[in-house]
Amino acid sequence: MSEHSPDKNSIDLEQSLKREELAAQRTALFGRTTALVLVVPLVTILTPWPGPVFTYCLLAVFAVSGWGAWQVAKSSWGRRWHQYAFISADFLLLTFTLLYPNPLVPLDYPPQFALRFGSFIYFFVLLAGLAYVYQPRLVLWGGVSAALSWSIGVGWLLSLPDTVWHQSNDISVEAVLEVLAQPTFIDLGIRAQEIVVLLIAAGLLALAVRRSRSVALRQARLARERENLGRYFPKKTAQMLAERSDPFSTPSEHNAAVLFADLVAFTAWSEKHTPRQTIELLRQVHGMLAEVVFQHQGTLDKFIGDGLMATFGTPEPTNKDASNGLAAMVEMVTAFEHWKRHQEIANPDELALAVGVHYGPVVIGNIGSKDRLEFAVLGDTVNVASRLEGATREVGCHCLASGAIVAAAKAESDTDSLEYRARLSRHKSIQLRGHGGKTEVYKL
């Protein structure tokens, strides 16, 4: 089991995060719409009629802007700069809404007086909505856009001829109150304070979003690793491995069942068929055999050409490893025969499945270099299982199980394995190639 390409994983993680960003932006759009709806009765109550009509129009523009940003974000032609443009437009529109005098309000007050209403707090509401998209740069851009928009608005008010923005040298209470009482007075100190606090809030919010993005990426990475492990290990084992930082750093040794399966006559069959047909057949057979392995809590160690190697009891042993290995062997043959009868690939009868399974001590750990590691199961048990699969041709059967795994299955006292053991018949001991002494075997 080799490590996956970091580049591909990075791309997949970015795509996953992009999907999360779109989902979050959709949530933000819902929240934005809800907030606008809630503002309507507030404006209706607080603004003299027919002043609310003007505000209703501005709220509608806000709604359309949010909907447009969402449509662009989920489109295939949308670009990242579009998001920045919509954010800038939002803050400019908010500044216009807060500072430009409502022409329908039947009250005669100067434009500068709008600063007395404390409406600057709405900028923080709009800024908080940017936290949904997991992009700290967007939050910072929102803070800068808000500061610039507000500065432009205040600058426009300062340019009006009747604006009073400086206080006299007389600092008596009466003099200060006299200046503050003027409806066209603008306190530049408060305006500067608003902008500074807004930028600080944007920076803090961007740091929080950056942290959230890191957590989201880490969770996506863990989910991807767990998904990758699920292609080799049973679900519970994959969960265990995903939670451990380095589960194979120290080699371990214990008993396990090892199974080898191979397509007999596949080479001759592939010579008569197209590469597309050959690949399609391998995909179907590999998928079918792997499913049987996982059904019996096995680990898919590797695909070997037209066959595979699987283990039962790795990386951690259970009390049913031998029984699971026997059950997988028998069901593989059953599933293969069923597959031959119900698929459309040409000349399936030319193919046969050979399976060998053995039980004994194995060594489990990582092999390779620091740049490329591979999870490996080693030992004489692996060699015997491989030789048993090859010996099926000599014996003239589909499956060969060693006496060791049959004895281990009996010792496990698993009632489910009785059915599979009953289908096996004892064969005379055979001499395996490259292995000393004869091996007791059972055939299907």
Image (tube, rainbow, N blue to C red):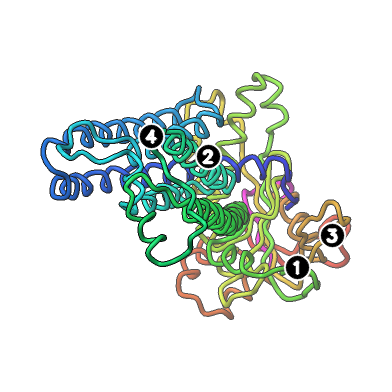
Marks 3 and 1, how far apart at CA? 10 Å
Q: Amino acid at mark 1?
A: Phe
Between 381 and 32, the one lying in front of the other is 32
* First in sequence: mark 2 vs mark 3: 2
| Residue occupied by mark 3 | 367
Between 181 and 370, the one lying in front of the other is 181
Q: Which mark is residue 93?
A: 4
Marks 4 and 1, how far apart at CA? 58 Å
Marks 4 & 1, CB-CB < 8 Å contact: no
Horizontally, is 294 left or right of 182 in the view?
right
* First in sequence: mark 2 vs mark 1: 2
Q: Amino acid at mark 3?
A: Ile
Frontmost of labels 4 and 1 is: 4
Q: Amino acid at mark 4?
A: Leu
Q: Secondary structure at mark 3?
A: strand
Residue drawn at point x = 21 percent, y = 44 percent = 37
Residue drawn at point x = 88 percent, y = 65 percent = 436
Q: Secondary structure at mark 2?
A: helix
Q: Which mark is residue 148?
A: 2
| Residue occupied by mark 1 | 248
